[in-house]
Image (cartoon, grey):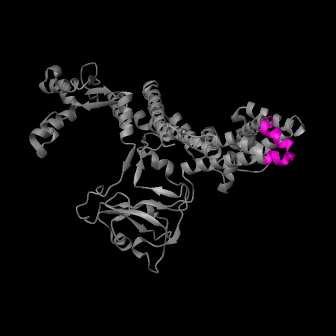
């Protein structure tokens, strides 16, 4: 069992690497990189060399390439010579000064600059200054001397993976005044359970429990999916998909300094999110907090993107199994009768019609007949906004489960053990309930994790149509906005779910089918 799981995990990690590398190759190498400026207002307001130089800055930020500015090279060079007393005025003031000379390539500093970075695989890129016909420089017509180097997909993948997981330690806080550094388990004053807390770590609460999905939360270990560059400028993608949305959720609670006393205050601050404050505390902060962990986020009454996607996907899967499996049993027990023909008609129609058609069908019926909100934005009662997306996902899943349950049961009905059961005088109810159903459901169990994944992946279109603030909608928005960071992060997210669902499906098969074992007598 252990060896099988290890092989599965290693294969899953390899698959994950291949998928992420492929996605990076597609978005960074096979798509024109200039599309990232389509909705960039800063780029649109610039022109000529200022615009071109801005492009190189953004290309480096996005991870397309690396570049070095000649002015920065001079600054570093003379900083090393003159120390902290150096200012840029002691060398070339700007790149314009360097290119004013007709023999700028003969300049010793320029030659040194080019030779230094050509040895590292860089290439010379020179942006000529804009001039009038008489040779005078136009206003702002500065030339730029750059050394550029394209980044390979392997280097980009390595940089992404090496920073994927980070762990907080007691040395994270760089404050010499902090002497009491620890990581320990303490009783959580806000819920009565226990929590892992730290001092010297970035967050105060490292592991804690609360009433929000997934109920156990980690600040100790961070999964860094990258940074958004367009939709959520320079924000951590992990934070984007896990931060709750909605209105501030104020409640009557105790600030950390008053835990155990009779003082309660109205606030929306999430005390589990407190991070260390490297600045000087105000008098109010000194009153409310016993230490310098005073910087926190606010609680909100809505779900995060991750929660919205999982809620819709899991509820749709539960409904599909609760409805699809019994209907499949009914079809099998009434094979070739009216109930079975109606069920088969539903299955054929549902699986043959494109999924997008159901979305618009349910949206039309739901909004016109039942007065349900079409999108999350116009929902007065938020819980009603989940009905149409869940129904759109569940209908197709129900048809698939009906089809497979019917097929597996009909296969079992022709087995020898069923004939023996009938010969022993067992009723059809007993035969179907105790024998056929139990054996037929085993392959269905294997697909439960995959069904949850299918609802999550299928929700990409559903979330987009219904404007659900979820991961699927985030992915489609990122594709339209060419936000490469989010595209790679979502690929990592969905691929991870896929490999996890395969492993969980195998474990469920071994649990419910005694004939299946992942080991043999030889331990292989």
Residue 348 visible in the picture: yes
**Looking at the image, which is closer to me, 430 or 230?**
430
* Count of picture labels: 0
The image position of residue 455, as x and y in percent, is: 63, 42
467 relative position to 229: left or right:
right
Which residues lie in the magenta part? Answer: 413-433
33 relative position to 138: left or right:
right
The image position of residue 162, as x and y in percent, is: 36, 40
The image position of residue 329, as x and y in percent, is: 79, 43
Q: Is residue 461 above or below residue 221?
A: above
Residue that extends furthest to the right in the rendered view of this protein? 338
Residue 136 occupies which quadrant of the picture? top left
140 relative position to 318: left or right:
left
User: Dominant secondary structure of the magenta stretch?
Assistant: helix
Magenta stretch containing residue 340, yes or no? no
Q: Residue at the location (39% across, 38% down)?
A: 161
**Looking at the image, which is closer to me, 157 or 127?**
157
């Amino acid at each position: 069992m252990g060896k099988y799981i290890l092989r599965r995990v290693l294969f899953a990690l390899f698959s994950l690497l291949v998928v992420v590398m492929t996605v990076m190759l597609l978005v960074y190498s096979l798509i024109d990189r200039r599309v990232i400026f389509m909705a960039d207002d800063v780029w649109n307001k610039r022109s000529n060399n200022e615009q071109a130089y801005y492009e190189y800055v953004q290309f480096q930020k996005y991870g397309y390439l690396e570049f070095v500015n000649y002015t920065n090279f001079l600054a570093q060079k003379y900083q090393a010579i003159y120390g902290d007393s150096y200012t840029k005025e002691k060398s070339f003031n700007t790149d314009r000064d360097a290119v004013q000379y007709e023999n700028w390539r003969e300049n010793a500093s320029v030659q040194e600059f080019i030779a230094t970075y050509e040895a590292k695989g860089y290439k010379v890129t020179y942006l000529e200054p804009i001039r009038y016909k008489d040779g005078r420089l136009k206003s702002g017509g500065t030339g730029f001397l750059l050394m550029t180097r394209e980044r390979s997909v392997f280097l980009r993948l390595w940089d992404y993976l090496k920073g994927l997981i980070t762990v907080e330690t007691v040395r994270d806080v760089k404050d010499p005044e902090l002497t009491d550094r620890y990581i320990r388990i303490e009783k959580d004053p806000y819920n009565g359970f226990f929590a892992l807390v730290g001092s010297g770590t970035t967050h105060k609460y490292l592991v804690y429990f609360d009433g929000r999905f997934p109920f156990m939360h980690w600040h100790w270990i961070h999964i860094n999916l990258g940074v958004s560059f367009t939709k959520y400028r320079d924000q951590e993608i992990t934070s984007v998909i896990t931060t709750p949305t909605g209105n501030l959720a104020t409640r009557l609670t105790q600030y950390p300094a008053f835990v155990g006393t009779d003082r309660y205050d109205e606030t929306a601050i999430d005390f589990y999110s407190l991070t260390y404050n490297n600045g000087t505390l105000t008098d109010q902060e000194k009153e409310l907090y016993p230490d310098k962990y005073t910087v926190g986020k606010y609680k909100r009454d809505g779900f995060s993107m991750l929660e919205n996607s999982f809620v819709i996907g899991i509820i749709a899967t539960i409904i599909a199994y609760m409805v699809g499996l019994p209907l499949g049993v009914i079809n099998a027990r009434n094979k070739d009768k009216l109930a079975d023909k109606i069920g088969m008609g539903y299955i054929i129609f549902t699986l043959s019609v494109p999924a997008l058609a159901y979305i618009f069908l349910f949206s039309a019926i739901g909004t016109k007949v039942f007065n349900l909100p079409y999108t999350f934005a116009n929902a007065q009662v938020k819980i009603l906004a989940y009905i149409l997306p869940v129904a759109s996902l569940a209908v197709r899943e129900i048809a698939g489960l009906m089809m497979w349950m019917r097929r597996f049961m009909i296969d079992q009905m022709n087995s020898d053990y069923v004939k023996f059961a009938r010969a022993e005088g067992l009723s059809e109810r007993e035969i179907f309930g105790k024998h056929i159903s139990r054996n037929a459901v085993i392959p269905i169990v294997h697909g439960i994790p995959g069904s949850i994944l299918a609802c999550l992946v299928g929700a990409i279109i559903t979330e987009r149509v219904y404007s659900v603030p979820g991961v699927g909608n985030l992915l489609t928005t990122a594709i339209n906005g060419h936000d490469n960071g989010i595209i790679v992060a979502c690929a990592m997210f969905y691929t991870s779910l896929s490999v996890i669902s395969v492993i969980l499906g195998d474990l469920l098969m071994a649990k419910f089918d005694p004939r299946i074992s992942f080991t043999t007598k030889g331990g292989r």
